[in-house]
Each structure stands twice: as structure tokens, then as C-alpha cells.
Amino acid sequence: MKEAYLKIRNLTKEFLSEYQEEKVIAVKDFNIDINKGEFVTLLGPSGCGKTTTLRLIGGFENPTAGDIFLDNVRINDIPANKRDTCMVFQSYALFPHMNIHKNVAYGLELRRLSKREINERVEKILELVGLTGLGNRPVGQLSGGQQQRVALARAMVNEPKVLLFDEPLSNLDAKLRIRMRIFIRKIQQEFNITSVYVTHDQEEAMTLSDRIVVMNQGEIEQVGTPEEIYARPKTRFVADFIGKQTNFLTGEVIEKDDGKLRVKVWDKVVTFDRPDEFKKGDRVLLVIRPEMVDLSSREGTFEGEVSLVTYLGSEVIYEVVANHQLFTVQTSNPLKHGIYHRGNKVFMNFDLKSIYLIKE
Amino acid sequence: MTKTKRFVAYLKRIPSDIKKLLREPFLLIGIILVNLFLFLFIVLPLFKIFQLSFEDKGQFSLAIFSELLSKKYNVQPLIHSLTLGIAVSILGTLIGFIFAYAITRVDIPWKRFFNIMATFPIIAPPFMMSLSAILLFGKQGFVSKLILRDIIQFKIYGFYGLLVVETLTYFSTAYLTLYGVLQAIDPALEDAALDLGASKGKVFRSITLPLATPAIASAILLVFSQSLADFGNPMILAGNYTILATQAYLTIVGMFNMKGGAALAILLLIPSLIAFCLQKYWVSRKSYVTVTGKPSAARIKMDRPLTKYSIFGLCLLLTGIIFLFYGMILFGSFVKLWGANHTLTMDNYKHVFTVGWEFIKDTLLLSSVATPIAGILAMIIAFLVVRKSFPGKRLMELVSLLTFAVPGTVVGIGYILAFNQPPLVLTGTAAIIILVFIFRDIAVGVQTGIAELQQIDPSIEEASTDLGADSSITFRRITLPMITPAFYSGLAFTFVKCMTAISAVIFVVSGRWNLITIAILGSVENSDLSQAAAFSIVIIVFILLALWLIQFLVNQIGRGRKLKFEKAEALQSI
């Protein structure tokens, strides 16, 4: 087992709010091991402490407790300007009075590299981000996407040990955002750059990351690959935060034998294949994604009534009320399967293989 | 209770702040130096005045005040100063409001011209108005003697004269404050009121005026403190109407009574400080409008002919008066002997550039040395205050802004008290004049710098740190270039103030180092009015040249940004 490249141990950050005297815990007991070349995303709602964590790694904040190790060196006491980390800022933070070339060369100049080497490296990185020949442009004249590339180039050109991203795509329009995240991922993989990325956009996190850290109120809820996070959420928060409109049903384990788990939900008994960690009498939470439900007009486990229909072309989203609970159901290819209307009686069938159980 | 808690929380932060500072020796040295300068050249002089007035045989005592307040010749200047200040502030704000409202809300022609006329008094030496008043309405006055043939006697020496000249001088400040706020009020608010059925008059009364009220209060307080601090005009026009600022000077210079002068200075300082605190901590909090400097969307203008032309007429009348005053100085500077021989001549300018050359040279030299130092220092203080965290930061900000509140006379007295004896003997040197120049108006530079910095995303500086720069490199290569406009505005403002300064420097000038403003005062006292006028015109020409030069420099580096000189002045009110 090789040693992790970026190691964070029991990292805690408390702020004293300036006017209210109370302590605000922004990050609490944060632990993670990140391997060289790995792309890890910190994901969570605003105020969950993800940006603070990133700024702690970058050296812009001092931790209240805990340690950060980079390449086996404790970096807690190294100030931001001496730390081998580079950040891509949310606002890009390009120096408005310098052109592209000067912006990118800034870090190299501070390291007193020769003029020739600086120029070579800047040219190379500008080519990589697709800005060849634009070095003399003032940054004020660039489009959002171009500014983003300059910001990326400015950080990457220094070949930092860790590249930090603070919601770098949040100021771009939807289409450009998708293009840029593919671009970032490609470059990151090609150069094997260890990266920590902060976002509140789960789709962004899913497409970019090797692993995702879901945070809530300063604490880690779950660390895992995008698939693990989506398919096997550890807590209700993760199940709810990841994915759109997750449905929850509570049930009780009434029987457990030869690899089967019988769970009583409402007045029905549902059988699952995953008995591992549960025992008889446990209360469980069924995590049912909208796409795990099929609708039928004839037969099914639960009966309900359609209360809202949202037609999106390739798919239809329904709201179905069953037993006084609202379900979100997503069906694909409506041209083939037909469309239900508001007020229709429907039956819901759950895809029991996909549904995940959480102990309540 | 909460205050103690807050204080404890603040104390708790100190160790971590200090730890951070120790990692950056440059920053630490910078902070220590700035604090040392602020202490030596702002706090210490003030402290000396307090010490001299309150100390009686080594003990704290209020005896001097009971003595002061029991004598009529001391109480009177206080009452005079306050009466004049209140009258000038109300009248000046009214005129400032008329101009600001006309330019922002009424569909009148010649807006640019009115704007220039309303801001011109700021760059002119303040006592020019008094000189002009004498030229116009004095015993040998153009109006009083040549036109009216002594039919009416104008009492220009005293309250009414001062009221007119100070109003004409200081309404500009009110104008800029009110212009900024009236401009910044979201037009949608007024549109909404119109849309809901209010007449334009009703919109003015129910929306515009209430929103502008804090700014009006602010303008009144600012003009009030400017009137209190005014030195040049009362020196020329006060007559028997004694004023604190000049009385303190005369007590010290004329009667060699240091202690009495210092005590008068404190009487002057107290109302100024009160006005400053009211403006800073009370009025500005009531404001609904933030001045961003961004032009807002199109605004519906008053266009009813009656309103429009009466306001236009009023503006025309006021600018006419301003024109008359300044024009008379220009005319006077070419006249052989005012009141007796009105043939045109260049003699006065010959005198200015021969006999007066020493004064011009000294003024230009000292101003040119002080201006860049003041500019850089102000930006450093702004940077430290906005971007860095260290113990005593609030105090640093407060002290640097304190100079707003302290009248020049008080500063001057403080300087002769503080630097007349070891360890720092500076009286008679060029250094003391330069120091007065630097610290007299540093607040404006600091304030402009702070305002500019607060609009700049801090992550730009963090990016610089992230890429390996320490605080000093970041300041030099990133912060300073980004706040160039504020920096140059600060330079322009400081230069104008140096060229026109009189109240504080009059205490520290010497035979070896002298200034034009002092020369003008001397000429007026000798009744060499034409020479004084020529000196005044020369000052204005040099100021305009310098402003043009600074604007030229800004254009060279500055991505076509316009010098925000007026903003610098307007920022006093924020």
C-alpha cells in the first residue's frame, strides 16, 4: 500500500464571527488520503465548509487543529506563497493590468527563472489551453471561457504538487461549462496532476472526479467514487443531496433468511437480495431514484394517482401520490410507452435490484 | 456585556495575527513604520496641545477652560465660529443641492458648464473669494465705488462678508456629496412612484428628498467643519468679527501666548470632532444609497417649462456670481493700482516672478516632494487596513482619518509645540512643511484607496500570493497598479491642497522656506491687492497644469480611465 500524496488529518477550522461572539465551526475533523494524480471533488451545499477546506489546503486560512501533509511534508506552517499548491479561483482573479502572457508568467518570474525558460513554458502552456498567439491580449478583452483557460494556465504552468479549483466553472454558461469540464478532466489526466476541486454542482462532480467527498455542515458525510455515492449512499443526506428528487420510503425488516431480506413497507412486503448488515426488526430507509420506478396502468406493487406531468421530450417526469406520499417518477422514451395524464390511476413497480437500503 | 465579549474575542485573535505577521517581516516592518509615522505626526502634535492646555504645574486641570470661558474675548470667537459655521453650512448645502438637483434631475442645458463652475472653488485657493470681495465691494471696490459711486456702503468686513465668501467657497463640497447620492438613487424608485400615480413634485417630496436626507445632513456637517477650519477668509475679512481659527493664531503669534492659543485650538477642535463623529458614525449609517460611481440607467427629467427655466435661471445667477468673483481677480491682476489707477499692466506678474519667485519656487518644490510621499503612504495604509489583519488595525484607520476632523490651525499649533524641542527639532526646516503637507490631508488618499480596494476582488491578490509572492511584492506588482486611479486622484488632491494650504503651514513657515499663500496674505495686508490677485492666478495656473499633467500620466498608463478627482473630494462624505 503506497503512502498517500496529500494527507489531511483531523483538520478543524473554527471562526470567531466578528460581531456575533459565537464560534462558527466551518470544518470539523476532516480526514482524507489523496493519491498522486487523483482528482477529488469536495461537494456539498453552500456553507458546508468545502471552500474553507480548499483554502486551508492552499494556505489562505490557518487550521484551528489538525495537520496537512503534502508529499510527506507537514505544510501547516508554510505560508500560502511558499506552498506548492496553485489555485484556480472562482472569479478567475486575473490581474487586470497585465496581458495574458504576463499573467501566466507571474509565478515563474517570482521563482527567478530565466527569461528564456519563462517564455518557453508560457508558450507551451498557452498552446495546451488553446490560446496560442494571444499572449499580448489584455485580459479584460477575453470571453469567460478564455479567462478560465488563462486562470488554468497560470496555475498549471508552475507545475504545483496539487492543483486547487474553487468552483471555477460557476461563472460560465451551461454549454461552456460542459465543454470546460471535459477539457479540465482531459488535461488533468494527461499530466497526472493531483487535483482538489470544489463545487456544489453534482453533475460536475460526477463527470470530473475519481472520488467525491460529500460534505455537510463542516463534516464529511461520505467519500467514494461517483458510482458509490450515487448507488450506495451511506446517509439520508447523501442520498437526498445526490440525484434529483430522490424518493424515500421507510420500512421494517420482518424476516431474514438465505440471502433474502423481507421488508414491510406500508401494508406490503417487499423482498431484497441484500441482507448483509441488517437484522430482523431494523427500521430501514429505501432510497428510490425516480428512474427506478416503472408505471403501469394494470398491475404493480403500489397504486397511486398522477398529480403532475412534466414532458421533456426524451423523458417524462411524473408526480404520483400514493398513500398520501408524493413520488417522483421518471420514464424514458414516452413515444413508445405512452403518456399518463393528471388524474390517471397508475401502479408503481420498483426495480428492487437498484434500490438501496439505509439503516434508519 | 456583549462589548466585553467582543473585546475578548478580539484579544483571542491577537496571537494568531502576530504569528502570521512574524512570518512576513516586510509586512511587520511596514506596519510598525506606518504606525510610528501616524503617531509622531498626527497623534503627538494633538497630544501636545492637550498637554499644554490641561496641565497646570504638572497636574491635570481644567483651569484654563474656566479662565477661557469667563473672558468675553474668548467666548465670543467660539460663538462667532459656531454661528458662522451653521449659517454657511445651511446656505452652502442649499446652493449645492440646487446645483446637484438641477444637473441630475432637471432637463436644463449647459450641464457640463454648471458642473465645472460648481466644482471649480475646490481647486482655487479658498481665500481668493475674500480677495475678490474686497476688489468688488471694498472701499475702492469695483461695484461699490465705480458702479454705485458709494451710494451703498457694503459691510464686507465681518459676518455677512464671511457668510458670502465661505458659502461661495464651500458649497462645492455639498454639491459633490449631493450629486453623488442623487445620481446613485435608482431611477426605478422614482419611476415606480410616478407609475403609481405620484406627480413629479410628489416624487420629489416623497421619494427623492427622503432618500437624499442623510446626504444633506452629511453635506451640512462637512461644510460646517470646513467653515470652522477656514483660516484664509477670516484672516482677510473677519474685521472685528473674531473667529476661533484666526484668534488662536493671533494669540500665539501676536501675543506670544502659547497656552491661550492651545486652549482656543481645543475649543475649535471639539465642535469639529463632534461634526466628524456625527457624520461618520451616525449620518452615514442612515444612508439608503451606496455611491458606486456607476452611471445609472436613463432617468426621467423634470421638463415642465416653469420649473425648468426657474431652476436654470437660478443656476445661471449663481454661476454668474462665481464668475464675477473669479473674473474680478483675473482683471485685478492686470490693473496698475486698484481703486486709483485702472490702466492695464503686466507689472504685477513681473513682481510675482521676480520678488515672488522665491515663494513660487519653494511652494512648487515642497508640494512636489510631499505629494508622491503622501500618495504612496495613503495607498499603503489603505492596503493594510482593507487587506491585512493585525492588532491595532482599526486604530490605524481611525488615526489616518482623524485628519479630516482636525482644523489646520490646530495641526499647526500642535506641530510647533511638538517639534520645537528635542528629540525632534524641525521648526524652520523644509521638512516640517513637507510633513504638514503629507499628514494634513492624508485622510482623503486613504479613503479613496479604501473605497477602490473594496471594489477589487481580494482573490486577485490571493492569486498573487498563491503564485509565490509575499505581501510587499503583491502590493507593488498587483495592488498598486490596480488602484492607480485612486492613487492619482490622491496625488491630484494632495497637490491642490499643498498649493492652496494656509491654515496649518502658516505656523511652520520660516524666512528660509516660504509659500505663495502666505505671500498673498501679506500682499492683502499691505493693500497690494493687484499683486495678491496675480499670485492667486499663478497658483491656479500651476494647479491646472499639474492636474493636466497627472491626467496625462493616467492616460498614458491608465487604460483611458478618467481621473476621479471629484470622487476623491466626494468621498469625504462617505
Image (cartoon, coloured by chain):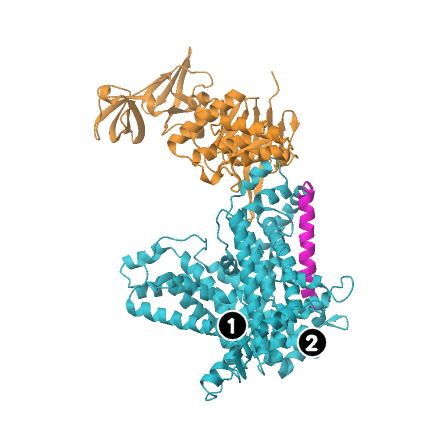
Chain colours: A orange, B cyan
Compare residues A112 and B553 and report the one nearer the observer: B553
The vertical placement of B128 against A122, above or below, is: below
Chain under callout 2: B
Compare residues A111 and A170 and report the one nearer the observer: A111
User: Measuring 47% from the left and 84% from the top, which residue is drawn there?
Assistant: B146
Disc 2 residue type (three-letter): Val
The vertical placement of B454 against B536, above or below, is: above
The image shows residue B359 at horizontal and vertical percentages of 65, 68
Are the residues flagged by discs 2 and 1 in contact, CB closer than 8 Å?
A: no
**Circle 2 residue:** B253
Most extreme residue toward the bottom is B151
**Crowding near the residue tagged with mark 2, few <14, some 14–19, many ≥20 C-alpha atoms within 10 Å:** few
**Crowding near the residue tagged with mark 1, few <14, some 14–19, many ≥20 C-alpha atoms within 10 Å:** some
The image shows residue A258 at horizontal and vertical percentages of 42, 10
**Circle 1 residue:** B330
Residue span colored magenta: B21-48
In the image, B325: left or right of B409? left
Compare residues A307 and A174 and report the one nearer the observer: A174
Residue A234 can be seen in this image: no
Indicate the secondary structure of the residue bearing disc 1. Answer: helix
Mark 2 vs mark 1: give the one in front.
1
Per the model, the C-alpha gap separating discs 2 and 1 is: 32 Å
- Name the quadrant of the C terminus of chain A: top left
Residue B346 can be seen in this image: yes
Q: Tell me, yes or no, whether the highlighted magenta stretch contains residue B43.
A: yes
The image shows residue B312 at horizontal and vertical percentages of 36, 69
Chain under callout 1: B
Disc 1 residue type (three-letter): Leu
**Residue B549, label in figure:** none
- Sooner in the amino-acid sequence: mark 2 or mark 1: 2
Compare residues B515 and B290 and report the one nearer the observer: B515
